[in-house]
Amino acid sequence: MSEKLKISIKRAGSLDLPLPSYQTEHSAGMDLMAAVGEDVVIPPGKWGLIPTGIAIEIPPGYEAQIRPRSGLAAKYGISLVNTPGTIDSDYRGEIKVILINFGGEPYTVRRGDRIAQMVVNEVVRAELVHVEELGCTKRGDGGFGHTGK
């Protein structure tokens, strides 16, 4: 395994909650917890902005992606509105998660619930070069579903 990337983290008033952590040796994402002051009920088909109680300082050249937790999706139909959400290296505010309830029952978010996961990735910045024509491929400009199921 390569050297670990160091990321500074600051608590945003949530001293009672553990910091994000990997749940297993080979987990790609760290679990984020709900830092709500009181229970938040998200009705079916609605969403809510849920604070995590942390802010981070990501080094330039990296990002943090905020992704849904598969267990919440499979059991309750809970996902993220913007998935994956991106935390840029120059953002210093509290991380908040936009949970959406695709399920059929109201979902209650409680303080300390694991609500999302955070994956840190290296970022490659592209330079766009304007051209009059693009190179040819077998697929060409075939779009959604053109290759079958």
Image (cartoon, helix red, strand yellow):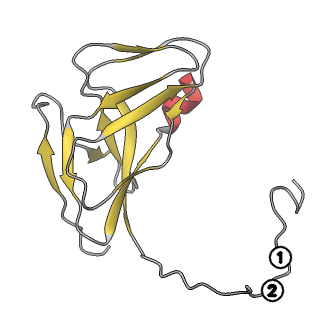
When the figure is inspected, residue 32 is found, relative to residue 45, above or below; the finding is below
Q: Secondary structure at mark 2?
A: loop
Circle 1: residue type: Gly
**Are circles 2 and 1 on residues that touch, CB within 8 Å?**
yes
Answer with the quarter of the image where residue 8 lies.
bottom left
The x and y percentages for residue 84 are 48, 49
- Badge 2 density bin: few <14, some 14–19, many ≥20, Cα 10 Å: few
Residue for point 26% across, 35% down: 52
Q: Secondary structure at mark 1?
A: loop
Q: CA distance from mark 2 to mark 1?
A: 6 Å
The x and y percentages for residue 83 are 50, 45
Circle 2: residue type: Cys
Q: Which mark is residue 7?
A: none
* Residue identifier under label 1: 140
The x and y percentages for residue 57 are 19, 57
Would you say 92 lies left or right of 50 here?
left
Answer with the quarter of the image where residue 113 lies.
top left
When the figure is inspected, residue 67 is found, relative to residue 8, above or below; the finding is above
**3 or 95, which is in the foreground?**
95
The x and y percentages for residue 97 are 37, 36
When the figure is inspected, residue 130 is found, relative to residue 75, above or below; the finding is below
**103 or 26, which is in the foreground?**
103
**87 or 4, which is in the foreground?**
87
Would you say 145 lies left or right of 135 here?
right
Quadrant occupied by the N terminus:
bottom left
* Residue identifier under label 2: 136
Would you say 110 lies left or right of 7 here?
right
Residue for point 20% across, 34% down: 53
